[in-house]
Image (cartoon, rainbow, N blue to C red):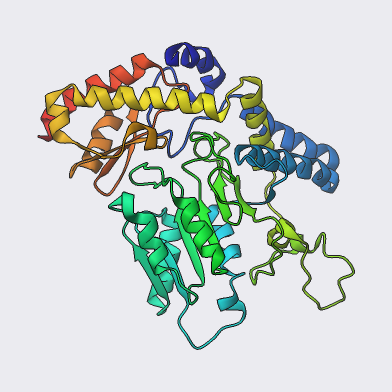
Amino acid sequence: MTTDIALALQPHYSDFQVDKRILLSGHSHQAWPNVAKNGVLECYQDAALHVDDKWSNAFAKAQRVKDFYGALLGEGDAEITLGASTHELLLRFLSDLNCFKQPTSRAVKIVTTDGEFHSMRRQLNRFKQLNMHIEVVPVAPSETLAQRLIDKIDAQTDAVMISAVFYGTSEIFRDVGTVAQHAHTLNVPCLVDTYHALNVVPFDINGWQLEQAFIVSGGYKYCQAGEGNCMMRIPKGYNGSPIITGWYAEFSALDQAPGQVGYGLGSSAFDGATYDPSSHYRAAAVFDFFTEQQLTPEKLRAINQQQIAQLKNGIAAVPKLAEAFTLAPHPLENNGGFLALTTKSASQWVAKLHECGIQTDSRGSQLRLGPAPYISEAQINQALNTMEDIVGQLA
């Protein structure tokens, strides 16, 4: 099935030459279908034709992006605000915390893990340097992570910031909802990063028990929408007043008196400011393509699981490769969209594979192999054969 789908899809990605090179970097940056170019051109044409009146068209594209994300979350009427990056959205979330709006003498306390993506990790580490209390809970052993996080959350906690799939190991955090629910019982805001889940791991807010959670994600990875397409879902019924606030947040703030800073309800309170709309035109074209090709999260999950199994089994079947890497202990069904391989030579593997026309990446001691629906079984086998050739050089 995987090869049939890949070969059918590859012509739609000819601009990225997915049939001529092996892009095992799908967990970081997936190729864009050719229709993405049409979206960019449409944005230009709307600007040229309508000048400043283009914004009604641009906002319609933004709504298409929101609708797609809402569908992926299993929440068709989700309260969603958009941003250029998850970091931008994290700042809006953080600036809405009471500890910053109404400071007290005690230190700010945020509970997180050591498996978070760079944008969150770096910002929280900077807070730590400012003598804030950043409680970093080790992910391993993952089977006890939920309880260990819960043990750190108390009435003095200002926020919990964790992931649904850990970006280093690709392990799905099945109990993330248990943590979020516990935080909610203490009136502690919980933000969940789903960037490595949406559109590769079927996701449903109710099923994951994340009804009361803030959720961030984006289109750079498994949604194939490129840069500038990140989103934050706001819990229903929540009305914030973030300190970092763009003028778009005034659009639905009725009867605002001069000098006041009013906020709309729900997600509108977290809206930003003037932006480059080409990202949303591009994303809307890609999301329409996904719909036309019936590339549902369930179908993409089935493809990805076959590809991960092929990579994992292929490495285990070659003694030299099996000896060179340590595979993560979690089972295939708890694996996200990429395969993480532990090796002291991770960065050297990336360089050697790149020389052979195979794109991957590494994070510390983790070599990460990220397939995509346009990657065929033959291409994965070619990558495995190349790895077998390389392993002797790095021994």
Judge whether 144 appears above or below 226 on screen: below
Q: Position of residue 270 (x, y in %)?
A: 68, 61
Left or right relative to 248: residue 145: left
Is residue 315 toward the left or the right of residue 371 in the image?
left
**Left or right of residue 264: residue 27:** left
* Residue 283 point in image, percent of width and height: 64, 36
118 horizontally vs 353: left or right? right
Q: Quadrant of the N terminus?
A: top left
Task: Return the x and y of residue 133 as percentages of the image width and height.
Answer: 40, 75
Seen from the viewer's position, the closer of residues 147 and 105 is 147
| Residue 88 visible in the shown view | yes
Q: Nearer the viewer, residue 337 or 212?
A: 212
Q: Which quadrant of the view contains residue 71?
A: top right
- Of all residues shown, which one is farthest toward the bottom? 105
Q: Nearer the viewer, residue 379 or 331?
A: 331
Q: Residue at (33%, 25%) from the top-left corner? A: 309
Task: State whether residue 179 is above or below residue 285.
Answer: below
Q: Tell me if I can see residue 189 in this picture.
A: no
